[in-house]
Amino acid sequence: VQLVESGGGLVQAGGSLRLSCAASVRTLRSYDMAWFRQAPGKEREFVAAISRSGGNTYSADSVKGRFTISRDLAKNTVALQMNSLKPDDTAVYYCAADSLIDGSYSYTNRNKYAYWGQGTQVTVSS
């Protein structure tokens, strides 16, 4: 499984960016997908996830109401629409995928995800 993120960049506070994750898989219906982020000197943290059924999405409290995760089954891509960006959103954003159905970890736990992209930098200036 290969995950390739794109769409990062520099944006002013209050602006928007749309990240995309292209997955080299047969179908996203077999994978739970998520976005995490890591700021300098901080732990990698959960941002948003979407279940393999597409019926459930999850967001961190810090991004609720501002970020939206979605997927395109035809293109095998997962997007993260980020609005009302803040300087605290500055981080490297990573796409992650999980194919197991064992329930050992919650969607917010990075240990759930076996596959990771290389990340894309998002910088929000004040």
Image (tube, helix red, strand yellow):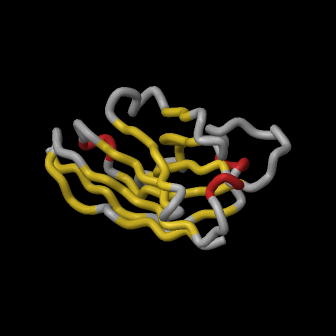
In the rendered view, does 89 fall on the left or right side of 42? left
Q: Nearer the viewer, residue 57 or 61?
A: 57
Q: Position of residue 118 (x, y in %)?
A: 51, 70
Residue 58 in view here = yes
Quarter of the figure with residue 26: bottom right
| Furthest-front residue in this view | 74
Residue 38 lies, with reference to residue 46, above or below; the image says: below
In the image, what residue occupies the spot 85% across and 43% down?
A: 102
| Position of residue 122 measured from the top left corner of the image (x, y, whole percent) | 31, 57
What residue sits 81% from the left and 46% below the top? 101
Along the line of sight, the residue nearer the viewer: 63 or 87? 63
x then y, percent, for residue 45: 53, 44
Examine the rendering and report whether any part of residue 41 can be seen.
no
- For the point 25% across and 41% down, the residue is 85
Count up the numbered dots: 0
Describe residue 1's horizontal placement relative to residue 81 as left or right: right
Q: How far across and how far down the image is residue 61, in percent? A: 46, 26
108 and 27: which one is in front?
27
